[in-house]
Image: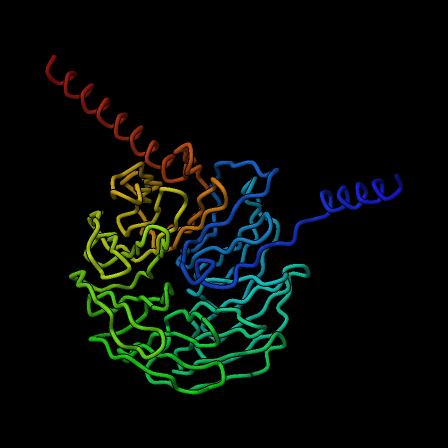
């Protein structure tokens, strides 16, 4: 009897004990760039907008019940995902276009003057490693933070900010690295794509026709990435030999998102398309035209794929057919702002930023969107136009009497 009571007590304690937060260790949350997290059981999906007060180019990071966003002027905000209210903020004292990552209550983000580590409990900068501009989003692997810098170096720092790896490569490393089986994959503006061991050994490199700022994805012993030469490349992870490439007709700055179960890779390009390719041979499955550059990296949830376009629209498509499920234009055409920030999804909450400095949370399951400041501005313009038209008509009729 006592044994059963003890077992029951242990089960109850486990049920009521806090669940460990799932870390956000890389750009878009993982090596497949799906940018998706399950929501907690007591989470309520709400619609909201939040003003960051300067453009948001980076992708948010999800950790616990908060989304962490960084504006281009270097202000870090912790936003309650359920209410859209600010929990705290921190001035990083340096502009940034890098996306933050979070691992065990420590946030890492690149800035114009290097990489910064922030304690999200005390809201303080723990350490600051100076190395020039870091547009590359860090990758956390085995207690080392890997990232590239515009100084051409691939760095690996430990949790105390001490250098464990400093590898000089050519060009600027704006691509965000991934680490798989102790091998680091990263692109450079010098047209090369590199594979470097965490032991600092050169493994191989592959030359494309232009800059590589796209961050690679990994699937089935291959790495996939885009290049400004207009191609998407799929390489063998062990020797760098090309398995296939696909011409997308214009620069590919977007990073690939992988759906392994459907053998699909989704990637945007500057010709205005989000394209879906077969990861096995690069065969075109479908392509969806937006009319402007797609530099945002897509997020996946169930049968949906979501991404932003520089035309100011967020698109949610059927991932199998490319057909539109719904679109959201927070700028209401009159005040369009490019959406280069890559969306993230927590349960049914889809969150993204735009160049107007707003961050938005919408319900991707019910296709519900928040009102926006731009909407109210557009309504104001419409009211003014109506008043002007009425005044003109009244004056015109008065003159003709």
Q: Quadrant of the C terminus?
A: top left
Residue drawn at the location 30% of the way across and 34% of the way down: 381
Give the farthest residue toward the right.
2
Residue drawn at the location 56% of the way across and 63% of the way down: 91
Q: Quadrant of the N terminus?
A: top right
Nearest the eye: 105 or 300: 300
Q: From the top left corner, tell me how far across and down residue 144 is, in percent.
A: 55, 75
Determine whether 180 is above or below 152 in the image.
above
Q: From the top left corner, tell me how far across and down residue 139 is, in percent.
A: 49, 69
Count all numbered tags in the image, as a single digit: 0
Determine whether 187 is above or below 387 in the image.
below
Residue drawn at the location 30% of the way across and 42% of the way down: 317
Nearest the eye: 235 or 393: 235
Q: From the top left corner, tell me how far across and down residue 236 is, in percent.
A: 31, 73
Nearest the eye: 280 or 286: 280
Q: Is residue 27 left or right of residue 394?
A: right
Residue 335 placement: quadrant: top left
Determine whether 92 is above or below 15 in the image.
below
Q: From the top left corner, tell me how far across and down residue 67 is, in percent.
A: 53, 51
Residue 179 placement: quadrant: bottom left
Give the farthest residue toward the top.
401
């Amino acid at each position: 009897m006592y044994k059963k009571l003890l077992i029951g007590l242990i089960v109850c304690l486990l049920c009521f004990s806090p669940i460990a937060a799932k870390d956000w260790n890389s750009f878009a949350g993982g090596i497949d760039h799906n940018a998706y997290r399950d929501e907690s059981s007591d989470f309520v999906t709400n619609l909201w907008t939040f003003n960051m007060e300067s453009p948001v180019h980076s992708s948010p990071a999800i950790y616990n019940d908060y989304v962490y966003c960084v504006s281009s002027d270097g202000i870090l905000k912790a936003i309650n995902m359920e209410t859209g209210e600010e929990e705290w903020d921190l001035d990083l004292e340096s502009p940034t276009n890098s996306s933050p990552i979070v691992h065990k209550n420590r946030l890492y983000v690149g800035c114009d003057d290097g990489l910064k580590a922030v304690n999200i409990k005390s809201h303080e900068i723990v350490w600051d490693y100076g190395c020039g501009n870091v547009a590359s989003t860090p990758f956390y692997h085995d207690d080392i933070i890997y990232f590239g810098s515009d100084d051409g170096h691939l760095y690996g720092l430990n949790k105390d900010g001490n250098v464990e790896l400093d590898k000089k490569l050519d060009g600027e490393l704006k691509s965000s690295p991934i680490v798989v089986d102790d091998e680091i994959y990263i692109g450079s503006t010098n047209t090369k794509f590199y594979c470097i061991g965490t032991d600092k050994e050169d493994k191989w490199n592959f030359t494309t026709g232009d800059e590589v700022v796209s961050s690679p994805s990994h699937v089935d012993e291959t790495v996939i990435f885009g290049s400004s030469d207009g191609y998407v490349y799929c390489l063998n992870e062990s020797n760098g030999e090309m398995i296939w490439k696909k011409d997308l007709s214009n620069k590919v700055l977007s990073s690939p998102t992988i759906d392994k179960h459907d053998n699909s890779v989704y990637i945007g390009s500057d010709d205005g398309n989000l394209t879906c390719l077969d990861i096995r041979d690069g065969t075109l499955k479908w392509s969806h035209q937006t009319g402007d550059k797609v530099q945002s990296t897509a997020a996946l949830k169930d049968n949906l794929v979501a991404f932003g376009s520089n035309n100011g629209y967020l698109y949610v498509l059927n991932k199998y057919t490319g057909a539109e499920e719904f679109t959201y234009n927070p700028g209401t055409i009159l005040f369009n702002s490019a959406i280069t920030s890559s969306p993230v999804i927590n349960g049914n909450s889809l969150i993204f930023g735009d160049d107007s400095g707003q961050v938005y949370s919408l319900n991707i399951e019910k296709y519900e969107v928040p009102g926006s400041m731009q909407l109210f501005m557009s309504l104001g313009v419409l009211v003014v136009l109506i008043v002007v038209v009425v005044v003109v008509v009244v004056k015109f009729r008065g003159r003709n009497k």
